[in-house]
Image (cartoon, helix red, strand yellow):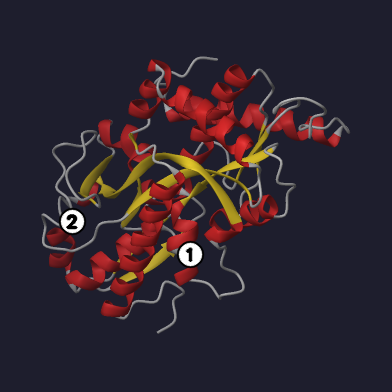
Amino acid sequence: MKFTQMSRRILVTAAGGVTATVVLTACGGVKTTSTGGEGDFPTGNIQMSVGASPGGSTDLITRAIAEGLGKELGVSVPVVNKPGANGALNAKELQSAKPDGYKIAVQNASLFTITPLAVSANEAVKLDDFDLIGGISQDDYVLIAPLSSGYKSITDLKKTGKNIKYGTTGVGTGAQLASALTFQQAGIPATDVPFDGGAPALTALLGSQVDVATIQVGDSIEQIKARKVVPLAVFSPERIKFLPEVPTAKEQGYDVVVSQYRFLTAPKGTPDDVKTKLAEAAKKIYATDAYKKFNDGHCLTPIEGSPDEVRKILDEYATKYKAQLDQYGISLAGKK
């Protein structure tokens, strides 16, 4: 299947179908992966797991890369969804996998830079427990409201004088952080309503369960284009090409720059030659016209850095986010 600029609705269905096939096969006793045999890596299938449900950005990125890796390396690359705890459940399973390159995963920066600020030290997942293969892309967040609300900016929310119920993609996510920082800086009384991903948060917004929601641009772009929701602000450093008319939070007077960055990982201790082969194959995928169209079709900005560059980005995020939460006295865990 070629990468196309399909609607997310179509891709969600397709992703769900693939996942069901993988799960049923596994239940039937047929292995979805192989640790291979004699010879150069890979000699067997490579499993890519996703710490999110089918249809979201991480899932779609994983499937695009899996398809490309299969072609580049000449093996099957099944995708298995293992959602839960903002990707932490999948991460901990990958952490304990054999470090041979036959189990890898796309992971989210928020799991390592924001979630640790919302959970206990024992629950937090550490970057040092994984080997980095390389960076992939960035997904920006947008604050949206129903068209019927009449809201057009953050200032409009402030003028209401009422408590704003805001939906996010979950506890310890960039959506929660961006929203909390914005409402605190703006002096807007607000209540966080976390959901398990962008799709349910968008559904809740359309169903009037929340007043506004912060989700990833790719998860909301169709509803924005259809004028069912109105974008009030993006949380990127500058305006993004996918929503060029929408001002940033910074333009509106709020120091809130939060995005979701994704990168490819393997269990700690994976051989250098295996990581190099995976990284080189990934670079070839990213360079194709098909993958570039995939990025544009899902509002993704490529940031395909080296492991050292990925680590630098994550360290900067973690330091900045913690400092801002301390500065404004915000607790993502809901405790003051």
299 or 103, nearer to the observer:
103
Instruction: Count the marks.
Output: 2
Between the C-alphas of marks 1 and 2, the distance is 22 Å
Q: In which quarter of the image is the N terminus?
A: top right
Name the quadrant containing residue 106.
top right
Amino acid type, residue under disc 2 in the picture: Ala
Residue assigned mark 2:
249
* Image location of residue 285, percent across then percent down: 47, 23
What residue appears at the point 12 percent right and 66 percent down from the top-left corner? 159
What residue appears at the point 24 percent right and 65 percent down from the top-left corner? 182
Amino acid type, residue under disc 1 in the picture: Thr
Q: Residues within 10 Å of mark 1 (few under 14, many from 20)?
A: many
Q: Quadrant of the C terminus?
A: bottom left
Q: Which mark is residue 204?
A: none
Would you place residue 280 above or below residue 179 in this image? Answer: above
Secondary element under disc 1, as helix, strand or loop, is: helix
* Image location of residue 97, percent across then percent down: 73, 49
Q: Which mark is residue 115?
A: 1
Q: Nearer the viewer, mark 1 or mark 2?
A: 1
